[in-house]
Image (cartoon, rainbow, N blue to C red):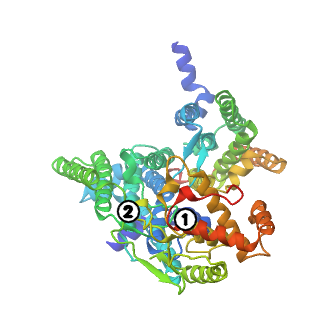
Amino acid sequence: MRNWRYLLRVSPLWSFLRVRHVWPVAGITVMSWLYLALAGPFITVPFQQRSVPSPLIWPVLAALGSLLLSISQSRQWEAGSSRNLAPYRLASLLLLSALNLVVARLLLHDLALPSLLIWYMFMHAVALGGVPFVAERAWLPLAAIALISMYEMGQPDSVVVRVMQRPGPVAIVAAVLVYVIATVRVSTTQPPLQGDDQ
Amino acid sequence: MMRRVLSLWRTSSPLSSICLLSAVEIVVLSSRGLPWRGEWAWTMDWAAGATVLTGPVVAGLAAYEAGRWRSALVGVVMPSARRRILGSLSPAIGPLLSGTLVYLLGTLTVLLITAVSSPTDNFEPQILLLGFLKLVAYVALGWAIGGRLQPIIGAVSALIIGYGLVLLASGDGAFSFLRIGGSTGPIAGMDVNNYAVLARSLLLVALAIACAVAVASQYSNTKSLRPIVVALAMTLAVGGATIVHRQGAEPYRLASSQDRICRGTTVQVCMLVGNTTQLDSWASQIERSVTILSSSGLQFPSKYEEPAPTAAGRNPSVGELFFDPGTVNTAPPNRVMIVETLSTPATCPGFAAEIPPTGAMNARYWLSHWMYHRIWPNMGGGEVDPTVVAWMTQTPTSQQDSWVRATLMNLKSCALEKLAIPVAS
């Protein structure tokens, strides 16, 4: 038991995960799963005339988890690492996505999975898109787009809901593309030093 | 002092905050084709309602700044500050100024747009104060959350908690005092409930003070001040809750007098003050239609009114205007609204009965379609029921006129039991 704890403290993988907010990511991810499991089929969005399917809120929470995982608490430590950390970054993001999608599939029997996948990939890309440029301030564009999209989903003629209900090939291809580009880019780029790092 | 505040604001990357808040504000204010144009009350309600989204964002910004400032506050600012509690305020100033600036600019813009339409209702800006206080409360909430967390974790947590509160506030529970603005229909015919505004203000200030106490206790040991401030917050909260209990929580209530402005000669069309932008268009279209239909001997009521927002304020002895609340000030009435209005010469409570009067409803439906085809004979298209058109082509005009006269008279006197469609009679 003591050896196991010791290994966790010193292993490069565990150190990497710790600087990548592993506990907050776990917290937010579990919270998003609880939301999926406990929320009713629809959620009332304020200022609107119609309710929004609850599962469409979940990708926003999942994207916040991806955002936290893509930001390092110690960029100088990562920059000075003798190892190439890009595979760690890529693997951790892909693993979180896979885990999220498996749990979503288990919890959601009725919702069409392609719709949720597309929305998840878009939100994931929005979350990671700003990280190479503005580091942790990437939460700002994610917050704006998430809130605006939730507001838009409550509109009687919501474009997002329409696309989600009948996702065409363009939406599917675009979602996969932005997901791959954002994930690979954030994994292979050192974010700019900011705030306390400077 | 001003220079210090501005320098604090500059440290919070105000440009990115303002861009983000502006994007959110613009989306909310410009959505649904600006239906609030032309009515002061609805315009101000809509502007205050934008805090539904900007509130959680300023909470996130305040939490982010609080997280960034934490080590500086503990290590540098607090030990040397003359006023420690004021020193701990520093992280909240930037987000509050950015949020207030965007809120003010957004509000001024929508007020200017409405001013162009010459609104006729009273200018009662109390609801705008609530919008501002909501921003203050959200900044305080974010400040309290972020003071104990890393910046990014604090920002994300405050955003989620802030939006969670917005969702909770949309119900009727304890958090409903955070539901401010966001009316999806006109507010004409309602008055601002000043008691509810006061109560909500007290509750919002109490929330802000409670959060500030939580922050101050983290940085300062001024134990003598803390009980006084906690007592103040509790007094405000209890005061607010008492007013809500006695006077209701809704910020609007039915106006004691339903003031309307009327136009027209043969038949007057009256709309509630605040909803009069399209009144001339309504009056001219009703006038023209009545002139055409009068050739069949139809006796219309002398007045058609826009109904009061609740059934309690409605006048049963006048005709009722059928309008789309979403476009009442922004688009002239369409043909369906005109014939629906003309075929409602009185507000009959029987139409809202538990068991719907099917025969009367069908007769009214036939009458409105007959009117449509008579007023616009060549433009019926798909909007006129073909069954009604077939009856009109097969039935002599005198027989048609006799049925429509009797039907309109029975609708006027609310004799719903006497109503039936002509083929069944």
Q: Nearer the viewer, residue B117 or A146?
A: B117
Residue B204 vs residue B298: left or right?
Answer: left
On the question of residue A134 being in view, the answer is no
Image mark 2: chain:
B
Q: Which residue lies furthest to the left in this view?
A: B224
Label 2 sits on a secondary structure element that is: strand
Residue B213 vs residue B321: left or right?
Answer: left
Q: Do labels 1 and 2 share a chain?
A: yes
Q: In the picture shown, does residue A172 fall above or below B408?
A: above
**What is the x, y in percent for residue B129?**
36, 66
Q: In the picture shown, does residue A121 fall above or below B73?
A: above
**What is the x, y in percent for residue B196?**
31, 59
Report which residue position mark 2 lands on. Answer: B252
Which of the numbered marks, if any, corresponds to residue B411? 1
Q: In the picture shown, does residue B269 fall above or below A187?
A: below
* Labels 1 and 2 touching (C-beta < 8 A): no
On the question of residue B232 being in view, the answer is yes
Frontmost of labels 1 and 2 is: 1
**Viewport quadrant of the N terminus of chain B:** bottom left
Q: Which residue corresponds to the image point at 63% horizontal and 83% vertical from the top-left?
A: B291
Q: Which residue corresponds to the image point at 35% horizontal and 72% vertical from the top-left?
A: B257
Find residue A158 and report its image quarter: bottom right
Tell me the amino acid under the disc marked 1.
Leu
Q: Residues within 10 Å of mark 1 (few under 14, many from 20)?
A: many
Residue A50 vs residue B157: left or right?
Answer: right
